[in-house]
Amino acid sequence: MMSKPLILVTNDDGISAKGIEVLIRTVQKFGDVVVVAPDKAQSGMGHAITVNHPLRISRSKLFNDIEAYSTNGTPVDCVKLGIYEVLNKKPDLLVSGINHGANFSTNVLYSGTMSAAVEGAMENIPSIGFSLCDFSADADFSGAQQIVEEVIQLSLRNPFPKHVCLNVNIPSIPKEELKGIQFCKQAAAFWDDRFERRQDPFGHDYYWMTGNFREIAVEKDTDLFFIKSGYATIVPTQFDMTAHTVINDLKNWK
């Protein structure tokens, strides 16, 4: 009899977020689950790791029958601690999320959710980051739960690509309106950043980042296009950021 896969779960919204609870309850039917997640929100941390102050980890009883730990570290710290201190081995699958908010297009560069999945890919662990395109704390995750189940089933049935993770985004629409899943590339888009200057009660200036997300070119085979069309998207994501196509051009620099 084959043993159940060992699944490590993490996120960037913090261990008490609704999204990670939904993810845990969804994936536990597929294997043995261990959770290592931040003790507070760590959104936008990207691939940051903790090097300037001590990392602490403690057992959490939030999920009753599930072995869970919270840490003051970043999502990537959670993966490292999970592998080398909690499990003392690599899990069979790493899942991150479900993030409150989209991580399509270039958002992947800032996302703690996806950086945790990328860290897993660097360790050659099949890794998936899940995001729901809804920032609300009480967002409806019923459609996302369905997509998570489908993606986990696909990942366990098929050979998982080495050193690649999956970036899964789910539109914030009613479950019955979801059209399916599309494998695609990430859209070319960027944040048109703005800063609001405000003052604290003592009259000191501070800044609050705002801005609009702008698509550079509308293409019909991207995550942003399919999300707008009612599909969940899966973008295979790698950590090799080399611009291979320009290496030969650079060799001709004089």
Image (cartoon, rainbow, N blue to C red):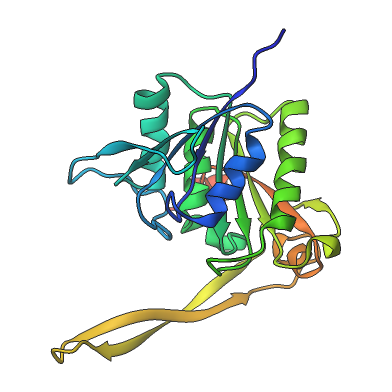
Q: Quadrant of residue 196?
A: bottom left
Q: Residue shown at 64%/37% (left/top)?
A: 27
Residue at the limit of the structure toward the front, as seen here: 64
- Estimate the x, y position of residue 100 in percent, counting from the top left: 55, 61
Q: Quadrant of residue 54?
A: top left
Q: Residue shown at 70%/50% (left/top)?
A: 145
- Estimate the x, y position of residue 249 in percent, counting from the top left: 55, 50
Q: Is residue 226 left or right of 144 when viewed as pictured?
A: right
- Estimate the x, y position of residue 48 in percent, counting from the top left: 35, 49
Question: Considering depth in this image, is 151 or 225 the residue closer to the camera?
Answer: 151
Q: Quadrant of residue 198?
A: bottom left
Residue at the limit of the structure toward the left, as seen here: 202
Q: Residue shown at 86%/59% (left/top)?
A: 179
Q: Is residue 174 left or right of 66 when viewed as pictured?
A: right
Q: Is residue 210 visible?
A: yes
Q: Is residue 252 visible?
A: no
- Estimate the x, y position of residue 55 in percent, counting from the top left: 24, 40
